[in-house]
Every structure is written in structure tokens, then in C-alpha cells.
Amino acid sequence: MNTILTNSINKLIRHELLTHGEFVALLQGNSEDLRKTLAYEADQVRRKYFGNRVYIRGLIEFTNYCKNDCLYCGIRYSNSNAERYRLTEDEILLCCEQGHALGFRTFVLQGGEDPYFTDERMTKIVAKIHHLYPDCAITLSLGERSKESYQALYEAGAERYLLRHETATKAHYDQLHPSSMSFEHRMQCLQDLKDIGYQVGCGFMVGSPFQTIEMLANDLLFIQEFRPHMVGIGPFISHTDTPFRENKNGTLEDTLLLLSILRLMQPTLLLPATTALGTIAFNGREQGILAGANVVMPNLSPVSVRKQYSLYDNKICTGEESAQCINCLAGRMNGIDYEIVVDRGDAISSNCISLCD
Ligand code: SAM
């Protein structure tokens, strides 16, 4: 093992800040041995803060209309094969009712950027959920909106927001998105969300088209500096109705290594083992947890629309009722000696970290 790799591993295990070159060394050194070493260390530190508890988030994919044309995404505007749907307010509330009964204490409302969901409509929905389920956290993942809109949604009761930065390399961002979208605006949105007081999640796809190790190192540097509360990463998976239909999928191995690195960079991070990870490998989510993830996001959307929220090909969990999904995941987590818990699963504040240490 070369010196820079050994030094980078040691610094990571001590949760010290790494340079771009050190992140590159870790990513270039990807091997079964390295993944095992880092997964072991990641598991140790995760157990220190979270024990064997895995948080669940009830995902409600409430619209697949989208005004954007991201080149990788199956619900992009110009995919005329996508069968569009949007849930009504009552349907969304029914998902929450069923989710609450099943033990969910976080609801994630995710959708394409659908102009139908104006601030007026969206704040009304958020306020209703907040009123009906005061013991639950509301997470939004609605894409880019104005700061005023984020503020209004926060005041209505949303506390968390997921907005993957997608890539921290501007030239790469421009390769993945149409010219109507901008890297600067996406980054500004993330800063606005943080300034308002949201618990913020950023993230990226592993193995997205044109991605290099240097770009991934930029992602890690950005995360190191931005210090989000959550990071969503999962493999890129091609979708037949997009310009990237022929591109290779991201790999399980790269995603697992990155999950361990992220856990060691930020020990209290909320880090999901994503559905995309479960799609590329039959036990991908279990492997993600064992590599350092501590969140899973079962689907609460009505089964009748699940297949239509098709971001990538062969997405799993599109045929089962919510109750079946949560039972299946609970069994999978028990199988690796972890347990899903009835808990909001808030980010641990930095005050607590110093007290706990
Ligand atoms: N519209 C919101 C936004 O832009 O954040 C939320 C919905 S968007 C579809 C959610 C995430 O799905 C994106 O941030 C992207 O990383 C991921 N995604 C889209 N297409 C994908 C693909 N082909 N493979 C893996 N992940 C994909």
C-alpha cells in the first residue's frame, strides 16, 4: 500500500479533514481489502452514535410531472413515454395515515419539479400533515425553488429538505443537465435551505456518466466543507427513455466504499442505503447498512402509481403494499443484526456530539 493511501486511511479513521489528493488516493485504492477495513471502522463509529438502530423514512412520491430535462432521469420533461400522475391532497394524507400506523415518524414528500404544486398548495399540504401528525418530521424533496418558497414551507412545518447537488464539478453538472439548469443555482438553493434552518441533505449518483475519480473527490470535498445533515448517494442506473440509455450503471463496490468514507468523514451523518443500491444488488441495502449507512426509505406511495415513478430501469419495491415493504425491510435488517425503529431520527446536534465524546 502506498504512503499517501495509508496516510489518508489513518486521517479518515481519525475523522480529520482530507485534501483532494487524499480523497483521490482512497478512491483509486478501491479494493476488497480497503472496503473491508473502512466498513469495519465505519460500523464501529456508527454504533457509537446510533447502536444497531436503523431509521426509516416513509417515501411518498407524489408527482412525476417535471419541468426539468435532466439527461439521466426517467421522469424528465421530454420523456413522452412516462405516464404522468399526481396524488391529490387526500391521497397524500392517506399515505401518511397508513405510514403512521406502520410506525413511520418521518414522511418524505418527493416529486419532480411540478409547477402545479405552487407554494399555496404545497404549504397547505405540509401544514395539514404537521397538524395531524405533530410527532412526525416532514422532509421535502421538491427540487429547486426560491428562498421565499423554502421559507414558507419551513414555516408551514417542513424541517428537512433533500436536494442532491448531483456533482460538485460545474463542467460535469453541465454534462448531466440541460442549459436551462445551472450548477450555481443548485448550490445557492442548498445554501438557502441551510440558512433558513432546515436539516439539509445533499448527494450524488455514483458512476454517473462522465464521472471521474477527481470529480468524486470534489464531491467529498464539497461535503466536507458544507457539512450537510444527510447525504443521499446511490448508483446511477440507466433508463431506457433517456439519452443515457446506453451508459453503464454505477457499481455496488464504489457505492459501498463511498458510504464508508462518508460515515468516517462525518460520524453522525444520516446516510440512507438507497433503493437504487437495492436495485443493483439483491442485498444491496443490507450491504449499504454494513458499510456505514443508517437510514432506509421504504415506499409509502399507493401501489397503483409506484411503477410510474420510474427514475431508472428495474426499480425494486414497485409491487408491494407499504405494510409488506416495511415488513420485508425489517426482516432484512434483523437478518444482519440491525433493527428498524419507531423514531423521527433527527440529526444529532453538534452540542450532543461534544457531550457524547
Ligand atoms: N425533483 C427533485 C430533485 O431534483 O431533487 C427530487 C426528485 S429527483 C428524481 C431525485 C433524485 O433521483 C435525483 O436527485 C437523482 O440523483 C436521482 N436519480 C434520477 N435519475 C436517476 C438514475 N437514472 N439513476 C439513479 N438515480 C437517479
Image (spheres, rainbow, N blue to C red):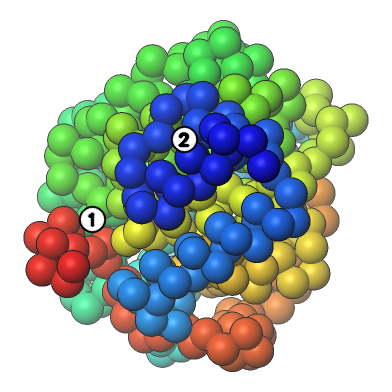
Q: Which residue occupies the foreground of this view, 287 or 59?
A: 287
Query: Where is residue 1 drawn, in percent x and y?
Result: 67, 42
Disc 1 target residue: 159
The quarter of the displayed image where residue 127 is located: bottom left
Crowd class of label 1 (few under 14; some 14 to 19; many from 20; radius 10 Å): some
Side (left or right) of 48 relative to 327: left
Does 15 appear above or below 21? below
Judging depth in this view, the residue of 89 and 164 nearest the camera is 164
Q: Residue at x 30, y 23 (%)?
A: 188
Residue designated by label 2? 220
Question: Which is more toward the observer, 233 or 111?
Answer: 233
Left or right: residue 321 versus residue 66 is right
Residue 350 is labelled as none
Mark 2 closeness class: few <14, some 14–19, many ≥20 residues within 10 Å: many
Task: Tell me which corner region of the image, top left, top right, bottom left or bottom right, holds residue 151.
Answer: top left
Residue depicted at 15% across the width and 39% down the height:
196
- Secondary element under disc 1, as helix, strand or loop, is loop
Q: Is residue 223 above or below residue 126?
A: above
Lower position in the chain sequence, tag 1 or tag 2: 1
x, y (%) of residue 47?
40, 76
Q: In percent of the image, x 36 and y 52: which residue is there?
A: 14
Q: Is residue 146 visible?
A: yes
| Front residue of 332 and 75 | 332
Q: Which corner quadrant holds the C terminus?
A: bottom left
Q: Is mark 2 within 8 Å of ligand 1?
A: no
Amino acid identity at mark 2: Leu
Expressed as whole percent of the image width and height from the top left, the position of residue 44 reads 44, 72
Q: Amino acid at mark 1?
A: Glu
| Residue lying at 68% horizontally and 34% vertically, measured from the top left | 28
Q: Is residue 14 left or right of residue 298?
A: left
Q: Position of residue 277 (x, y in %)?
A: 68, 58
Q: Is residue 178 left or right of residue 349?
A: right
